[in-house]
Image (spheres, rainbow, N blue to C red):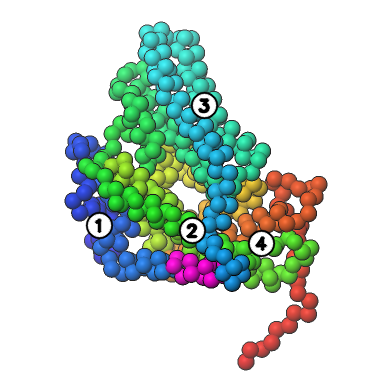
């Protein structure tokens, strides 16, 4: 076994020192094992990775000092990103109401499951039209429940825009609950008539709703105790990253784009310069978002729920193939897409069709989240993920194996420029809609920044020989 494979094997099978011990040793499930997250393992075992972590901490502190100085010089008071955080999580009361609606709908699935199972077993010996009617009613009830879970938040957010961070939370939770309901419905389907296994208790159902997985199991590997110090530290990291992104927004987005649309014309060079200025902060925000959600947040909930398998992602940063990256980036969602979308579609569409369907549906879901959170439809992420990303999977399949180092550089270049575009085009559209005068052609689906302001070339551009 090569050194690289040895490291990867240790990452996948890693156990924390003396704390990962499951309560039920008889549980055997290839999907779930006792594993720590790769970054937890690397930070705890490698001084080099720990130094990189410390570098990001220092960058956060430098941005904090820069923000303090800027606020004192420009405004005469210290803000330290609080106004940006408050603006991003604005109208949090309305967001909380939408979340409780989604949670209530999800809880309603459990009594519906019990009712349907009782009816199916009562009609077990009545073959024919009665069973068909009951099955149809059950499917209709499930679809109605899922429809209400998705439709009500979508219509409410489309009717009145919610603050960006609050909108992201509501829409992400909407999809999470919908995926949870689908997974447990599929898992319990064989039990409705033959009673091959008992239905989950309400306590286990509630545990599953908050467990950091979208795959349903009757039992999960558990740890013996909760390390509350680790929980608090993870939540502190989440809070720090939220302020980190607010500093990035104030230092790199607002100076370039907050005035966009107030003038009728803007020079192309100004736009290009602003786009390139967003490349580095866009990549840093991308890494921080990954660490915040897939590491700190999920590890905090895993620790509180004593959920033993912490492999929420794999070491995607070393890969040279886009196919491997998409599988390793988010194992929580990938596992659900594999079990509930990819595998069921293969018999009907073949592998290529199933892969395309997975990418298309996933890209559309991401675009729905952004559209409802920003308050407009601007399919930049859809094009990057659903078109460019799909094309790069077969392109890098062979080249990534032959030239791993070169292709890893190419992948990181795509991460830099892809996130730079996201951090440029979405703010451009957001401030164009905010600053440009209203028009009868304004639409949720038609980008405003395409017509306002007018982008013009700088007159009398000349190029001088630097030598």
Q: Secondary structure at mark 3?
A: helix
Label at residue 258: 4
Is residue 363 something one can see in this rendering? no
> Would you name the residue on which mark 1 appears?
10
Residue for point 48% across, 66% down: 64
Q: Quadrant of residue 452?
A: bottom right
Label at residue 145: 3
278 in relation to 136, above or below: below
Q: Nearer the viewer, mark 3 or mark 4?
A: 4
> Relative to residue 128, is residue 91 drawn left or right?
right
The percent coordinates of residue 307 (x first, y second) are: 30, 42
Q: Quote the CA–CA distance across marks 2 and 4.
A: 19 Å
- The quadrant of the rendering that contains the C terminus is bottom right
Residue for point 51% across, 37% down: 99
Residue interval drawn in magenta: 60-71
Q: Nearer the viewer, mark 1 or mark 4?
A: 4
Question: Can you name the residue that lies furthest to the right here?
Answer: 440
Magenta stretch: includes residue 372 = no
């Amino acid at each position: 076994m090569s050194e690289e494979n040895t490291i990867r094997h240790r990452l996948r099978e890693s156990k924390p020192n003396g704390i990962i011990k499951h309560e039920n040793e008889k549980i055997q499930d290839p999907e779930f094992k006792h594993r720590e997250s790769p970054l937890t393992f690397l930070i705890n075992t490698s001084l080099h990775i720990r130094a990189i972590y410390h570098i990001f901490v220092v960058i956060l502190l430098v941005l904090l000092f820069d923000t303090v100085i800027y606020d004192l010089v420009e405004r005469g008071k210290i803000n330290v990103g609080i106004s940006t955080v408050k603006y991003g999580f604005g109208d949090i009361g309305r967001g909380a109401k939408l979340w409780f609606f989604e949670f209530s709908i999800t809880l309603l699935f459990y009594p519906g499951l019990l009712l349907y199972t009782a009816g199916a077993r009562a009609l077990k010996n009545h073959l024919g039209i009665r069973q068909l009617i009951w099955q149809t009613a059950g499917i209709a009830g499930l679809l109605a429940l899922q429809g209400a879970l998705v439709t009500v938040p979508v219509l409410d957010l489309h009717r009145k825009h919610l603050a960006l961070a609050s909108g992201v939370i509501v829409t992400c939770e909407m999809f999470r609950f919908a995926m949870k309901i689908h997974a447990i419905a599929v898992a319990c389907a064989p039990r409705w008539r033959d009673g091959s296994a008992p239905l989950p208790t309400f306590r286990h159902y509630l545990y599953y709703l908050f467990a950091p997985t979208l795959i349903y199991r009757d039992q999960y590997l558990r740890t013996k105790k909760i390390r509350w110090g680790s929980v608090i530290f993870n939540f502190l990291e989440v809070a720090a990253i939220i302020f980190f992104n607010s500093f990035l927004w104030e230092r790199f987005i607002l100076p370039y784009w907050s005035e966009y649309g107030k003038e009728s014309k803007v020079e192309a060079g100004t736009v290009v310069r602003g786009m390139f200025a967003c490349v580095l902060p866009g990549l840093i925000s991308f890494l921080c978002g990954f660490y915040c959600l897939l590491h700190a947040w999920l590890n905090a909930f895993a620790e509180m729920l004593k959920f033993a398998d912490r492999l929420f992602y794999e070491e995607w940063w070393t890969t040279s193939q886009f196919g491997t990256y998409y599988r390793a980036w988010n194992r929580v969602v990938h596992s659900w897409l594999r079990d509930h979308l990819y595998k069921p579609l293969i018999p009907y569409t073949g592998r290529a069709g199933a892969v395309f369907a997975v990418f298309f549906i996933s890209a559309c879901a991401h675009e729905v989240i952004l559209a409802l959170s920003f308050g407009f439809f601007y399919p930049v992420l859809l094009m990057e993920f659903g078109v460019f990303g799909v094309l790069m999977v077969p392109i890098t399949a062979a080249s990534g194996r032959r030239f791993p180092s070169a292709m890893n550089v190419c992948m990181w270049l795509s991460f830099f420029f892809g996130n730079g575009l996201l951090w440029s085009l979405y703010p451009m559209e957001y401030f164009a809609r905010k600053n440009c005068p209203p028009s009868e052609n304004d639409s949720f689906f038609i980008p405003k920044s395409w017509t306002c302001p007018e982008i013009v070339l700088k007159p009398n551009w000349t190029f001088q020989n630097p030598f």
